[in-house]
Image: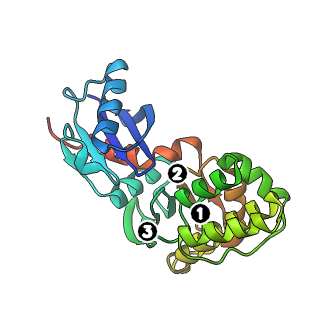
Amino acid sequence: MASIGIDIGSTAAKAAVMEDGKLVATIVEPTGFNSVDAGNRLAARLADLGYNTQDHPVVATGYGRVSVAFASKTVTEITCHGLGASYLFGSDGVVIDIGGQDTKVIQLANGRVKKFVMNDKCAAGTGKFLEVMADRLGVTQDTMGAMARTGKLVSISSMCTVFAESEVISLIGRGEPRENIANGVIESVVGRVCSLAGATLGSQSADAPCFLTGGLCENEYVIERLAANLKRQVITCPEARFAGAIGAAISASKIEQ
């Protein structure tokens, strides 16, 4: 019996399918305006793959989990990201999930969540912040990472995305090179994520790995800068974007039909 996990995030909606303890399918859709519609679009695509949500256990998680009417149950993001990261990377380490609306740092011990911290939703340390700044610079997030690699650091100090965007507009207005602004934007995000992770990592051994999940798991420059600032290995993979959905699918596999 297959089990299905649905993760409705603020920016992207993801689905994962597990069979016999193995990940067999993943789907991603933009969440858009309506979380209910996002869930239904995922259900339609799952049906196209042969996985009707009425025939398999479904667990929903994420920002819009209560909007998934066809879910058998809902489970918190922390639990699901912990389960998903443990499946992908190992049972011990620190999960850093940079989401659209928030960033979560989760300490795993023997595959279980030991403790976690989250940032404030308005703090400029999220994927949405990078998306807004990339749009302001007229580039994609991946292009912004490549630009940042060749730029010089400029300070972006605001903790709020709206005020930080005003800082970027001022930098553009005075003729600061885009490469420098991109560098400043990414260093701002990395600095806030590392500050959030500090207390959790302080209780870990010096060689304990960090597992990066979320939409930035394929941004090589962000991964490099996180590793340099945290002074430890940051492990990730393309499937890490689906960690929440994978964890939800693992939870669904435990539901008795």
Residue 89: mark: 2
The kind of secondary structure element at disc 3 is: loop
- Residue at image position (37%, 65%) is 113
Instruction: Where is residue 192? Give x, y as percent.
Output: 59, 73
- Coloring scheme of the render? rainbow
Which of 79/7 is in front? 7
- Number of residues whose C-alpha sits closer than 10 Å to that of mark 3, classed few (under 14), some (14–19) or many (20 or more): some
- Quadrant of the rendered structure where residue 55 is? top left
Residue at the disc numbered 1: 209
Q: How packed is label 2: few (under 14 Cα within 10 Å), some, or many (20 or more)?
A: some
Quadrant position of residue 12: top left
Disc 1 packing (10 Å; few <14; some 14–19; many ≥20): many
Q: Say whether residue 254 is visible.
A: yes
The foreground one among 198 and 166 is 166
**Residue at position x 69%, y 47% from top?**
142
- Please state which amino acid type lies under the numbered disc 3: Lys
Mark 2 or 3: in front is 3
User: Relative to 169, is 34 on the left or the right?
Assistant: left
Residue ID for mark 3 = 121
Asked if marks 1 and 2 touch (Cβ < 8 Å), the reply is: yes
